[in-house]
Amino acid sequence: MEIAMKRFVTFFAFILCSAILAVPAAFAGELNLSVAASLKETMNELADTFARKHRNVKILKNYGPSGALAKQIESGAPADLFISANLEWMDYLKKRRLVEPSTIGNFAYNTLVFAGTTTRKIAGMKDLAKLQRIAIGSPRSVPAGDYAMEAFKNSGVEKELAGKLVMAKDVREAMKYAELGEVDGAFVYRTDALLLSRQAKILFTVPEGLHERVTFPVALTVTGANKAEAQEFLRFLHSAEAKEVLARYGFPMK
């Protein structure tokens, strides 16, 4: 009886240890990504590529306006990596010590364009006064809208456009308004216009001298900085393989 009991205890201990050891193998880690909405398709592909090489890592993605994502992180939402569509919201989290400063770097760049279905001849900022409705992302949280407002001011058309602006929750919604003809046109990123437009077309590119360069900074949060999976994913985002994916989606590398 005593021998049988010892064998049972030994067998039970073996099963228990095996189960404990199996858990990390099946669920090695979880990555929470908070990424600007205009990077959705690109990040989906990059995340899938990384996941195929790291099968024990589960990647959760949260897309939205950069400002909204930053506020979510500030409120305690789970996030290991943050990619903003401008420097402002990255600085916002840096000042609050919510991202690891040593990990901040440039992930990609973009170009602001005006796209729409209007039949009027629109070739530059001065022609916008001819239009009735223009969509932009809400400047409070959407960098594309902030870039657009800066361009309005610097090109001297700010007052002429008063009352004509339609605010969208993010740059993708602004593109949707333009595509459906609900507005004459929208200020969006070139990559969004190339990827999402079927009816709308790019009418002109906003001169970069009218606004700060469209930059997508990336960083690990203070939580992510302590996770090996997040560190490895950040290295992957800076790799030549990731840059090839970005270039394929139309993001300029310099």
Image (tube, rainbow, N blue to C red):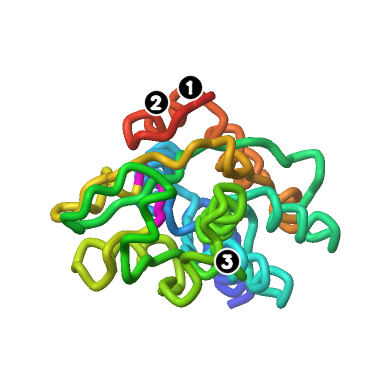
Under mark 1, the amino acid is: Ala
In the drawing, what numbered circle is on residue 244? 2
Task: Please provide percent x and percent y for residue 52.
Answer: 37, 41
Does the image show residue 28?
Answer: no
Q: Please name the residue that numbered disc 3 is placed on.
A: 139
Task: Please provide percent x and percent y for residue 143.
Answer: 56, 57
Label 3, label 1: how far apart the Cα atoms are: 33 Å
Q: Is residue 100 above or below residue 249?
A: below
Query: What secondary structure is marked by label 1?
Result: helix
Counting residues from the start of the chain, the first of labels 3 and 1 encountered is: 3
Query: What secondary structure is marked by label 3?
Result: loop
Magenta segment: does it hold 138?
no
Task: Please provide percent x and percent y for residue 55.
Answer: 42, 46
Decide which of 195, 48 is in the foreground and name it: 195
Under mark 2, the amino acid is: Glu
The residue stretch that appears in magenta: 187-191
Query: What secondary structure is marked by label 2?
Result: helix
Q: Please name the residue that numbered disc 1 is placed on.
A: 240
Residue at x-position 46% and y-position 77% = 163
Q: Are marks 1 and 2 in contact (CB under 8 Å)?
A: yes
Mark 2 nearby-residue class (10 Å; few <14, some 14–19, many ≥20): few
Does the image show residue 219?
Answer: yes
